[in-house]
Image (cartoon, rainbow, N blue to C red):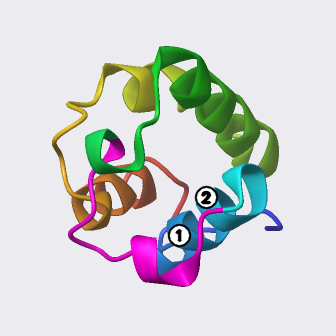
Amino acid sequence: MAEKTVEEFGTESLLDLLRELFAFPDEMLTPATTFDELGLDSLALMELGAVLEERTGVELGTLVEGMSRSEPLGQVAWSIAHLLPR
């Protein structure tokens, strides 16, 4: 995932990154899926946040780490997108 702006980053961007980092099968990843359902622990969320920061150039680690694990991935993607430059 190259550097993206808010207009470009969406749920599919987040789902693609989760596939890449953790090799989740497509059927597990939907906008309604949660981190809890995926079994991602705090270490995995730290890794996800670090990769997002590296690829977007925006500090997102604390946002991702602090999100409720029961929050749908679609909402997580929306929150991330709105921190990216317009």
Tell me, for residue 15, which label it has, or none.
Answer: 1
Residue at the image position 71 percent from the left and 61 percent from the top:
23
Residue 59 showing in the rendered view? no
Query: For the residue marked with disc 2, what is the amino acid?
Result: Leu
59 lies left or right of 39: right
Q: Which stretch did the figure color magenta?
A: 24-35
Instruction: Determine if residue 26 is in view.
Output: yes
Q: x%, y% of residue 5?
A: 59, 68
Tell me the SS state at disc 2: helix
Q: What whole-number distance in Å separates the C-alpha atoms at marks 2 and 1?
A: 5 Å
* Image spot of residue 70 (x, y percent): 16, 41
Neighbor class of circle 1 (other Cα within 10 Å; few <14, some 14-19, many 20+) is many
Residue 42: within the magenta?
no
- 44, above or below 10, in the image: above
Magenta part, dominant SS = loop
- Left or right: 38 with respect to 44? left
Q: Residue at x 27, y 30 (%)?
A: 67
Please state which amino acid type lies under the numbered disc 1: Leu
Quadrant of image for the N terminus: bottom right
Q: Is residue 26 magenta?
A: yes
> Which disc, if any, is residue 18?
2
Give whichever of 5, 25 is nearer the camera: 25
